[in-house]
Amino acid sequence: MSHESAAAAPKHRFSHGAAFTYRHHVVETHAPLIVPKLQVTGVIPRIIRGDDPLQMLNPFAPVKYGTAEEDTVLYPDVPGRGDGTKLLSVSF
């Protein structure tokens, strides 16, 4: 073998298996997205979620169907006086 052929030939011969070298890659970490939790309340969402929406009209219905005070907007100047009804309320 001449010097040229020895330089051209690889020193190590591998079979079909490949030699892998471990390279450490820095993994970029991102701050988790902060998803605001929406709270949807009011008469319309309670009708959609409820199993028996007619119980909302029953004054003697169990508490699991909710109370009228939950969806009543109170008049700010007179305590205890209702000013309206929340049909749909979204809180962040």
Image (cartoon, helix red, strand yellow):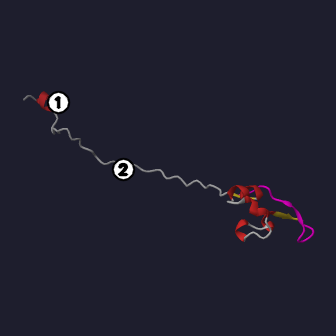
Image point (70%, 60%), residue name: 52
Of 86 and 23, nearer the camera is 86
Residue 62's disc number: none
In the rendering, at what x and y percent does residue 90 appear? Answer: 74, 56
Image point (19%, 38%), residue name: 16
Determine whether the residue tagged by mark 2 lies in a helix, strand or loop: loop
Residue 25 position (above or below residue 86)? above
In the rendering, at what x and y percent does residue 10 appear? Answer: 17, 35
Instruction: Locate residue 61: give its quadrant.
Output: bottom right
Residue reaching furthest to the left = 1
Determine whether the residue tagged by mark 1 lies in a helix, strand or loop: helix
- Magenta residues span 76-92
Q: Quadrant of the N terminus?
A: top left
Image point (75%, 63%), residue name: 55
Instruction: Locate residue 84: give its quadrant.
Output: bottom right
**Sooner in the amino-acid sequence: mark 2 or mark 1:** 1
Q: Amino acid at mark 2?
A: His
Residue reaching furthest to the right = 78
Q: Is residue 86 one of those drawn in magenta?
A: yes
Q: Is residue 31 one of those drawn in magenta?
A: no
Q: Amino acid at mark 1?
A: Ala
- Quick one: label 2, few (<14), some, or many (20+) residues within 10 Å? few
Residue under label 2, please give it: 24
Quick check: can you spot residue 85?
yes
Looking at the image, residue 81 sits to the left or right of residue 86; the answer is right
Real-space Cα distance between discs 2 and 1? 31 Å
Residue 8's disc number: 1
